[in-house]
Amino acid sequence: MRILAIVNGEYGRRHVANVQTHAPASWLLTVWQAPAFFPPVIDYPKRNPNERRNQHQQKQQARRNQS
């Protein structure tokens, strides 16, 4: 397996160290240190809190319309 780890801080370096420690010998791990001027990447953006409320209100309205 070939892995390219793109890191820009201590958190990423900790993950790389963990993979290096526990990966099988056949894995090839390459690390690229991203420049500090790159904006942070959001892997799992949180939903807008209002979005969930709006979805709930829409479901309630749809149920009312069915009755």
Image (spheres, rainbow, N blue to C red):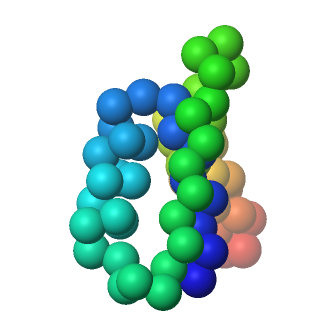
Most foreground residue, 63 or 11: 11
Is residue 53 visible from the viewing direction of this image? no
Most foreground residue, 52 or 44: 44
Most foreground residue, 67 or 41: 41
**On screen, 53 above or below 33?**
below
Is residue 9 visible from the viewing direction of this image? yes
Most foreground residue, 37 or 30: 30
**On screen, 55 above or below 40?**
below
**On screen, 7 above or below 29?**
above
Number of numbered discs on residues: 0
Residue placed furthest toward the front: 25
Q: Residue at x 35, y 77 (%)?
A: 23
Residue 40: x %, y % from top left: 59, 27
Residue 41: x %, y % from top left: 62, 35
The C terminus, quarter of image: bottom right
Q: Residue at x 64, y 21 (%)?
A: 35
Q: Is 9 left, or right, of 1 in this rendering?
A: left
Residue 28: x %, y % from top left: 55, 72
Q: Is 5 left, or right, of 14 in this rendering?
A: right
Residue placed furthest toward the top: 37
Q: Is 39 left, or right, of 50 in this rendering?
A: right
Which corner quadrant of the image does residue 32 belong to? Answer: top right
Which corner quadrant of the image does residue 25 belong to? Answer: bottom left
Q: Residue at x 42, y 28 (%)?
A: 9
Which corner quadrant of the image does residue 36 belong to? Answer: top right
Residue 24: x %, y % from top left: 37, 85
